[in-house]
Amino acid sequence: MAEKLEQLYEGKAKKVYKTDDENLYIVSYKDDATAFNGKKKGTISGKGVVNNKMSNYLMRKLQEEAGIPTHFVEELSDRDTLVKRVSIVPLEVIVRNIAAGSFSKRFGVPEGTNLLCPTLEYCYKSDELDDPMCNSYHILACGWATKEELDTIADYTFRINAYLKAFFKKLNIDLVDFKIEFGRTPDGTIILADEISPDTCRFWDSETHEKLDKDRFRRDLGHVEDAYREMMKRIFGE
Ligand code: UDP
């Protein structure tokens, strides 16, 4: 089994390690939680396990059933996963089906409004700049991705949304919005990387509209751990 060697990076919610294969890394999910670009900090007990297992499950499904290439290789333990080495495209790719969060604030559209079609937004990943929103012209002009890469990213992203929206609907959950990230493998192929979890998606119960995601932490709604556990239960059963 692959083993962790030198730690390469420690992010807000994950650590990344080298392995003895130069093309494979191990990501290790933590219980640390941050919001508002790190200004709010806390711990969500058991979150790392939920995010690891949920992300791996969804990436495997996306790969096998929707033909989306991903970084997922093998789940090594509750918190550790073997992934392909990529360099991350410095963009947060955000899809929205229902208005919430910064979209509602920016455009004055009340939270919960069904959007007439899914929207796609990009933010430039930069802690110093607070991840500013940008468009495809900014991305090409600054060289954050090429035209071909951006076309691939947009195509994959809408396919991922269609797949996930239908998947969660069967679990009685509305996929309100989510953020994904892509990476380039050493040969330049674009693949889905990072994670898909309650940290990076908004999940609302279809009937009660109860929030089952990190908004419980961001907005001090309580029962944060319960929400992560509930998502786990809906996907994997008891
Ligand atoms: N999101 C994320 N990381 C970020 C910003 C947003 O994972 O740094 C996710 C967030 O969980 C939500 C979606 O992207 O599912 C849209 O977030 P929004 O722009 O509304 O920002 P927020 O209100 O979370 O600050």
Image: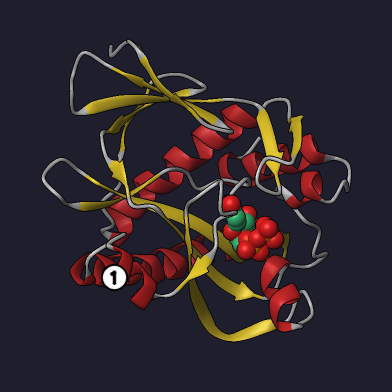
- Whole-percent x, y for residue 221 in the image: 88, 48
Q: Is residue 157 visible?
A: yes
Q: Is residue 141 above or below residue 196?
A: below
- Whole-percent x, y for residue 149 in the image: 23, 64
Q: Report the residue at 51% width, 21% height from top.
A: 78
Figure quarter occupied by ligand 1: bottom right
Question: Relative to the observer, which residue lies in front, 194 or 223?
Answer: 194
Q: Is residue 175 above or below residue 109?
A: above
Q: Kindly identify which residue carries mark 1.
A: 140
Question: Relative to the observer, which residue lies in front, 123 or 193?
Answer: 123
Q: Please, which colouring scheme is shown?
A: secondary structure
Q: Report the residue at 44% width, 70% height from top.
A: 162
Question: Relative to the observer, which residue lies in front, 220 or 60?
Answer: 220
Q: Is residue 173 visible?
A: no
- Whole-percent x, y for residue 95 in the image: 51, 68
Q: Amino acid at mark 1?
A: Leu
Which image quarter is the C terminus in?
A: top right
Residue farthest left in this picture? 187
- Locate residue 132 relative to residue 155 in the image: left or right: right
Q: Is residue 71 above or below residue 166?
A: above
- Whole-percent x, y for residue 42 in the image: 76, 31
- Locate residue 228 relative to residue 140 in the image: left or right: right
Q: Is residue 180 above or below residue 138?
A: above
Residue farthest bottom in this picture? 116
Q: Is mark 1 within 8 Å of ligand 1?
A: no
The quadrant where residue 186 appears: top left
Disc 1 is placed on an element classified as helix
Q: Report the residue at 71% width, 37% height from top.
A: 229
The quadrant where residue 171 appears: bottom right
Which image quarter is the N terminus in?
A: top left
